[in-house]
Image (cartoon, rainbow, N blue to C red):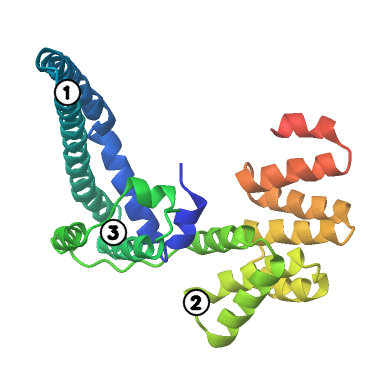
Amino acid sequence: GVYSGLITTTESESELASVIAHEIAHVTQKHLVRTYDAVKSMSLPAAAVAIAAVVIGAATNTPDLAVAAAAGVQAGMIQREINFTRSHEEEADSIGIKTLAGAGFDPTSMPVFFSRMGKASRLYDNGTLPEFLRTHPVTANRIADAYGRADAFPYKQRSDSLGYHLARERLRVLAYSDAREGIEFYSKTLRDGRHRNEESHQYGYILSLVGNRQYSEASAILEKLIAKRPHQSEYLVAKAELEKKQGKPEQGLKTLEQGLNEHPGNYPLSMYYAQALLDIGKPEAVNPLL
């Protein structure tokens, strides 16, 4: 699974790929199984020491000694688990960078993303650290290590796919509690030219306008994008959504049909088409599609 917040935190497709490569390494190196075995092997000795601590406390009539010994056992187990986790993270970084480079992505994107995660971690000083940052702590040593490993591979500049940028902006729009926040953000980035991909920011602006019921403004920008890329499935979905909001659900259905004729079996188009059929009261047509 991939957190939507992870996609919006990355700034390039290579950065997103670096996280996937890291997670693939956790699987191929059987880190979950190895951790389970390690914990299992610790349990009996730890139990024996804990029982001994209780016996010592009873025999010497010093309960504090028993508590201290038991706490020491617990701390030792936790530290061993931390050390084990750290070694797995290092291994996943190392193998992940090889996977990343082998797949044609920029190997330096992993340490670049780690640096951004490190900055994000410092911003969350109120204890509400996101799940991904809690499970993947970033240190200066880890970042330096990743840069060192990436340097072993030739630099690879790779253009991001438009699909990555469009997905990223749709997720950003969904994260706003008020569509006006999106309108403010995109109008500013488009005006100032502060974006990695102008077309995807226009797309995000369209979705925000639709969310704020500014249909005519959204339609004018969307028509230009469709004229440029008439077969882009994300634009066809946006057009169908806009037509539905404008009270033309049948027209939206035709737009999605056109998209599916051009992209048979396309997952997002199929899902939106199924929902459009339900919206106009044609559930019998949904089952065969799904």
Q: Amino acid at mark 1?
A: Ala
Q: Amino acid at mark 3?
A: Met
The image quadrant where one finds the C terminus is top right
Q: Position of residue 178 (x, y in %)?
A: 70, 64
Q: Position of residue 224 (x, y in %)?
A: 69, 75
Q: Earlier in the sequence, mark 1 or mark 2?
A: 1
| Residue pointed to by mark 3 | 110
Residue in front for this viewpoint, 56 or 267: 56
Q: Where 119 sits versus 25, above or below? A: below
Name the outermost residue toward the front.
Answer: 61
Residue in front for this viewpoint, 210 or 179: 179
Give me the C-alpha separation between circle 3 and circle 1. 46 Å
- Label at residue 66: 1
- In percent of the image, x 77 and y 55: which residue is there? 255
Callout 3: SS: helix
**Rendering quarter of residue 183:** bottom right
The local crowd at label 3, few if under 14, some if 14 to 19, many if 20 or more residues have their Cα within 10 Å, is many
Callout 3 touching callout 1 (CB < 8 Å): no
| Residue pointed to by mark 2 | 195
**Rendering quarter of residue 209:** bottom right
Q: Amino acid at mark 2?
A: His
- In percent of the image, x 18 and y 65: which residue is there? 154
Q: Where 288 sits versus 119, above or below? A: above
Question: Which circle, 3 or 1, is nearer the viewer?
Answer: 1
The local crowd at label 1, few if under 14, some if 14 to 19, many if 20 or more residues have their Cα within 10 Å, is many
Callout 1: SS: helix
Give me the C-alpha separation between circle 2 and circle 3. 21 Å
Q: Is residue 190 left or right of residue 102?
A: right
